[in-house]
Amino acid sequence: MKPIQVGLLGIGTVGSGTFNVLKRNQEEITRRAGRSIQITMVADLDVERARAAVGEGVQVVNDARAVIANPEIDIVVELIGGYGIAKALVLEAIAAGKHVVTANKALLAVHGTEIFAAAQAKGVMVAFEAAVAGGIPIIKALREGLTANRIQWVAGIINGTTNFILSEMRDKGLDFEVVLKEAQRLGYAEADPTFDIEGVDAAHKATIMSAIAYGIPVQFDKAYVEGITKLGAADIKYAEQLGYRIKLLGITKRVEGGVELRVHPTLVPAKRLIANVEGAMNAVVVQGDAVGTTLYYGKGAGSEPTASAVIADLVDITRLHTADPLNRVPHLAFQPSELSDLPVLPMSEVVTSYYLRLRVADKAGVLAQVTGILAGLGISIDAVLQREADEVAGEGAAQTDLIILTHDTREGTMNDALAQMQALPTVLAPIARIRKEELA
Ligand code: HSE
């Protein structure tokens, strides 16, 4: 049978990995796909780099639209990234009747609804395994492997850069800024790491998982996004003393009245497997009503791990290429006409437990004032830890760190408590608040 022909838009790290793995494992992949898959055309602004990556025998151009316009190309692989030109090219490829494979989480989290609708109307597939957690087949697991389940929650370490930074902060007791600089020097963090450290990249991925888990449209604009930039080494240390690790989690839960969708630093019991995922590795825990808890672990980025996901999509499309579009796996796991309008809840409605650290004056009655505020708002305390007071130079006043773990409470109520506690004259610095998840 004639090989399926693939055109790559962009041949950086992932593109060259895709080319190399396809070539190296060609025989095995053909046996699986039932047909040879060949990259026959590559577009990249840096034509020399592209030529060096693919050698002779592949058409190299500097115009992505030439790939889309080529009638021989069956599948367009978009590896440009971002919401800009990538969006136009993906929509043009769909309009030209091409199937699309993309690793672009930002594009799908923000414009997925438009892109999937266009693909549906045209009868082509948009596959995106590489968009979430790199080499971990979490899209496949959520969309197909767990299809019997009513998914209850998904929680993942889905950004390697921030997990690397948090691991280093914990191991070495260093502050965020110091570790970030080291991560950049080692090439673990981008020169502009904003999307990673501010939680945006993780929120893009959590948005996509949420849509697939519950059959709701992608709604990145409704996600709560908080990164790790304000996290102090002291909180990591105190959390450890209480039996917890702090991880940047992407969380989506089905709760009464809607869906939670949030990314923030989270205390996780140190005994959970996910709490022990270190360095740049990714892991996702999925709780389904039938299967219980399942865990997926692996490399969330990198040339060949991400290529592994891109090629899995190429094989899927090759197998389903001739299938009636109605018999293919729906983009968001649920039939497009069956998507639900379950709302994404505002953060003030989210119910979770909390870690609080208050720098307070170390004198009689302070603990009573603080716990009085919590009690007044019906917030139940799980544990209290007070560290030894240290004398503040020049002021002669003793200060201490008061660490409180609470039971579950509504975020809106916790916000009220924080405002009241912060207004106490005996609370001497901004209160650190970190959410806690037992993931039981
Ligand atoms: N920058 C991401 C990370 C990989 O650090 O995990 C691509 O999404």
Image (tube, rainbow, N blue to C red):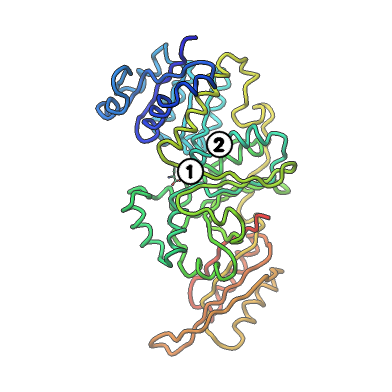
Nearest the eye: 425 or 379: 379
Looking at the rendered structure, the secondary structure element under dot 1 is strand
* Residue at the spot 59% in from the left edge and 67% down from the top edge: 243
* Ligand 1 lies in quarter: top left
Residue labelled 2 has its Cβ within 8 Å of some atom of ligand 1 = no
* Residue at the spot 45% in from the left edge and 36% down from the top edge: 306
The quadrant of the picture occupied by the C terminus is bottom right
Looking at the rendered structure, the secondary structure element under dot 2 is loop
The spot of residue 342 in percent (x, y) is: 68, 40
Question: Which residue position is annotated with label 1?
Answer: 299
Nearest the eye: 349 or 297: 297
- Looking at the picture, does residue 385 appear above or below residue 186? below
Residue type at the position of mark 1: Lys
The spot of residue 183 in percent (x, y) is: 36, 54
Counting labels gives: 2
Question: Which residue position is annotated with label 2?
Answer: 137
The answer to whether 341 appears left or right of 277 in the picture is right
* Residue at the spot 52% in from the left edge and 54% down from the top edge: 248
* Residue at the spot 54% in from the left edge and 71% down from the top edge: 357
The spot of residue 385 in percent (x, y) is: 59, 76
Residue at the farthest right position:
290
The answer to whether 166 appears left or right of 422 in the picture is left
